Image (cartoon, rainbow, N blue to C red):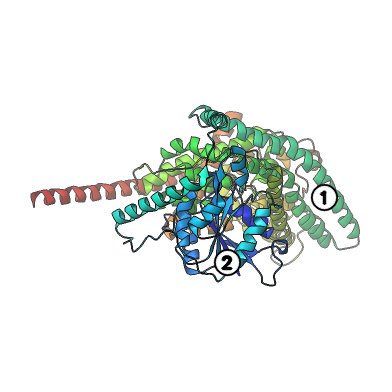
Amino acid sequence: MRIALAGNPNSGKTTMYNALTGRNERVGNWAGVTVDKKEFHIKKNFYDGAEELIAVDLPGAYSMSPFTSEESITSTYVKNEHPDVIINIVDATNLSRSLFFTTQLLELGIPVVVALNKSDINEKKETKIDEKLLSEKLGCPVIKTVSVTASDKGLLEVVKAAVAQKGKEQKAPYWEGNVDLTDKNAVTESDRKRFEFVNGVVKQVETRKILTREKNSQDKLDAILTNPIGGILIFVVVMFLVFNISQSQLGPYLADILTGWIESFQGFVADKLSGASPFMQALVADGIVGGVGAVVGFLPLVMVMYFLMALLEDCGYMARVSMVLDPIFKKVGLSGKSVISFVIGTGCAIPGVMAARTIRNERERRVTAMLTSFMPCGAKLPVIALFAGAFFADASWVGTLMYFVGIILIFVGALLINKIAGHKVRKSFFIMELPEYKIPSLKRAFYSMCSRGKAYIVKAGTVILVCNTVVQIMQSFTWQLQLVEEGMEHTSILASIASPFAVLLIPLGFGAWQLAAAAITGFIAKENVVGTLAVCYGVTNFIDTEELALVGGGNQVATIMGLTKVAALAYLMFNLYTPPCFAAMGAMNSEIKSKKWLFGGIGLQFATGFTIAFFVYQIGTLITTGSLGNGFIPGLIVVILIAAFIAHLIVKANKSIAKEYALGNNMSNSAKSA
Ligand SMILES: Nc1nc2c(ncn2[C@@H]2O[C@H](COP(=O)(O)OP(=O)(O)OP(=O)(O)O)[C@@H](O)[C@H]2O)c(=O)[nH]1
Ligand SMILES: [Mg+2]
């Protein structure tokens, strides 16, 4: 038996789904968190019958006539897939808005059970809803629930009621009648009537106590956090704190402990392998344990960051951030909705890109999907932490800078795309309900952190492990399948494949084949940059810089990698701002839905990564040493070619706009004369 969970955005569908199924899907305190359908069986402690109950979590929707693609997932599902029962999750604190959708669901004929969710908040605010009367008015069971409490009695009752309703006929309390959906006026008129009906019901069932004091304190906080200037400053400070704690304070402290364990494990493995061939020793101890260990060593940094971000999302702050940044992003044709993609993208670019689905305007959605990966994701954190630790004494400005450069690139990118695609920046509407502030749940943040941490470990144990093994083998053999001799590393398969790429990177300051190989494996998964560097340079623990000192002699990580500080910064930026991993490119493909835009986007990302690394390296070298870096002229030629190509595209776009404009004028002139 299939039970669909449907309702307005942010009403608590996913929270209930997680409680019923024991899953750990993404929950956030704003509208539009879930963008895809998810299903799983309901746990046995909610229902002891023989039949298996499947809960289906759906994206939030305000109406059955969808505006955005994630809303249409919901209406298509409930209309076409005929779930046995619908549990309609209603935000009890916002009854009149929610019941609009409820009355539409009731018209489908599928049995509905209404869950009056967040009833704990109503209790606090002393808002009373007569659920018996409401149930009579709607013609379906109505049950109070608190989804955040797993032991809530309401959850049990809701499931029980859903099972009891199966197969029953559902009557609708309100019928729209036959409205011509293509006639805008008729639809508006019918919506107005529906609202009237709903408001009539709400008046009868709800009694609210006017609480001025609490409302005021929320409003006061909003006035500060969404202040156009103060709000942005606060955002900068908050983000700095997040990076400082995760990458300079608590994160490295925990990472130190973890790497200690990894090292002893590596020692243990090396011991066991003492009789094996040197190749096997290198493959297992350095390639597999060392390479994977180097990536896993950064896990605490990533997890601390995920934990803090989950707290920020849950308390309602992130919704304010998107509101504060909305006017700024509007200037380049994006909106506060895009900000949500960018914020989610700091965890992982894939859900970030997918969140673009909630954007109505197609161009805005494509641009957002293209630019989201400029925000460094969790997989890029180890790369940032590695370079911040090895070259800049763990300074937290490095991480913060990478995020702000990311934001700037998003701006510039959006401007360029608008120019290239020939779009005038038009105002798009951004209506975002500000969810109520609440004390963030430590438990949820902990679960969210663990589930993402698990995904990180799984990735390290699969993709990264395979990549490191392949890299280690390719590095150990020549094309004649002979073991590479010491001092002859450049004859390895890996070196010969990566070298041609390395030549291209000379103007950026990092023309070594090892660095090129790491950047290439980075497209499979960004953590690979760390893993491959670990394998290629035989360094296994990047967090403990003392070890690096041992390998390089003196505290000279630069000697190991052959990089100056400036070149290291350029290399870091190159890895962050060129295209993301293949999986994220796949997500871009599915949200952008146009090959031309997709390849345009990937081209733009390559051009951005190259250009920024070129300028950082060349200008930085000029400032620090007084002369330009290697390969300045060829690099400059490439940058000029990129600029010329973009200029060409812009001119072309302008011409076609001018032509269209002229055509439009002619037509209106001829219309006048006619
Ligand atoms: N106080 C309280 N908060 C709740 C309850 N149920 C959910 N929430 C909170 O409401 C917010 C939204 O929850 P979600 O489960 O993500 O909502 P959703 O309906 O899935 O939202 P979309 O996926 O965006 O449509 C989260 O901050 C939850 O912690 C509840 O019963 N009581
Ligand atoms: Mg959801």
Mark in the foreground, 2 or 1: 2
Q: Which mark is residue 60?
A: none
Q: Tell which circle, 2 or 1, labels the residue nearer the N-terminal end.
A: 2
Please give the name of the residue rendered at 50% of the width and 69% of the height, measured from the top-left corner: 169
**Position of residue 58 in the picture relative to residue 487 (left or right):** left
Tell me, yes or no, if residue 325 can be seen here.
yes
Q: In this view, does 7 lie above or below 411?
A: below
**Position of residue 36 in the picture relative to residue 417 (left or right):** right
Relative image position of residue 140 (x, y in whole percent): 53, 60
* Pointer 1 residue: 262
Quarter of the picture containing the N terminus is: bottom right
Secondary element under disc 2, as helix, strand or loop, is helix
Please give the name of the residue rendered at 43% of the width and 48% of the height, measured from the top-left corner: 200
Tell me, yes or no, if residue 548 can be seen here.
no
Q: In this view, does 639 lie above or below 138?
A: above
Relative image position of residue 72 (x, y in whole percent): 46, 59
* Pointer 2 residue: 165
Q: Are marks 2 and 1 in contact (CB under 8 Å)?
A: no
The residue lying toward the viewer, choosing from 226 and 12, is 12
Relative image position of residue 197 (x, y in whole percent): 41, 52
The residue lying toward the viewer, choosing from 346 and 662, is 346
For the residue marked with disc 2, what is the amino acid? Answer: Gln
Relative image position of residue 65 (x, y in whole percent): 41, 58
Q: Residue furthest left?
A: 673
Q: Looking at the image, how many numbered discs can be counted on the residues?
A: 2
For the residue marked with disc 1, what is the amino acid? Answer: Ile
- Using a 10 Å C-alpha cutoff, classify the residue at mark 1 as few (fewer than 14 neighbours), some (14 to 19) or many (20 or more): many
**Position of residue 280 in the picture relative to residue 154 (left or right):** right
Please give the name of the residue rendered at 52% of the width and 53% of the height, measured from the top-left corner: 134
The residue lying toward the viewer, choosing from 107 and 571, is 107
